[in-house]
Image (spheres, rainbow, N blue to C red):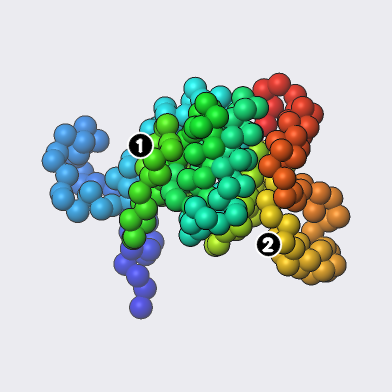
Amino acid sequence: MADDRFTRSAVTDRNRHGRVANKRPAGVTEDSMFLERPPTSFLASDPWRVLRILSEFVDGFDALAEIPPAISVFGSARIAQDDPMYASARQVGAEIASAGLAVITGGGPGIMEAANRGAQEAGGVSVGCNIDLPFEQATNPYVDIAIDFEHFFVRKTMFVKYAEGFVVFPGGFGTLDELFESLTLIQTGKVLHFPVVLFGSDYWSGLLAWLRERLLGEGKVGPNDLDIFTVSDDPISVVHHIQEVLGRKEPGKR
């Protein structure tokens, strides 16, 4: 049985106005529809959702537009302060800040807290882009500029738009999502001279072996694709690599 929403009569009974197709009774104008009080259900509709998403972008752009060039640091929220990676992320945050760069994280605990803490302690700009989750994730206390987001894709846009590179610590699905999105943007030429450092060679070794053996071995990526990131265990070398890659970038280019 045909869906009434997609019958020819339903599709053709529309007045076109610019790029939007509007269906309304004869004699009803756009102005009168605009001035009517919308039904409560409109608050849950897609058009209203678009406006909420737009407001998230505006809030993020407004908050971050004037921060210094930044590095986004990703990693697990599930590590404690006595984990060796916490100390490493704290030092990386400090080294990034000492190089005159801001630090952007997801604003939560674990690696994110450590990187924000190191940046703040070194006198740098510490940014946290938190996300609304089914379980509460409070913004860590080492964030100078805190922004809360409801949509992952808006939040991820901030990580890329205001960052000059990524440092990726051991983490879970969210960390891997952010890592592979950055690699895809570089591989496809959407961003250029964008350093990506995987911190913790032991943690990443299995993934790197799989990338070489399966993706590269089966021709699903090219040899140069595995050169768009590097691996490090030394916080100081992380920043040296970032500075070296950024030094090849033309002013004003991404």
Residue 147: percent from the left, percent from the top? 39, 38
Q: Distance between the residues labelled 2 and 1?
A: 38 Å
When asked about the image quadrant of residue 190, the answer is top right
Residue 202: percent from the left, percent from the top? 72, 61
Q: In which quadrant will I find the N terminus?
A: bottom left
Label 2 sits on a secondary structure element that is helix
Residue that mark 2 sits on: 203
Name the residue furthest left: 37
Q: In which quadrant will I find the C terminus?
A: top right
In the depicted structure, whether residue 89 falls above or below residue 68: below
User: At 62% across and 40% down in the image, what residue appears?
Assistant: 92
In the depicted structure, whether residue 153 falls above or below residue 119: below
Residue that mark 1 sits on: 55
Label 1 sits on a secondary structure element that is helix
- The amino acid marked with disc number 2 is Tyr
Q: Can residue 36 be seen in this view?
A: yes
Q: Closest to the observer: 139 or 247?
A: 139
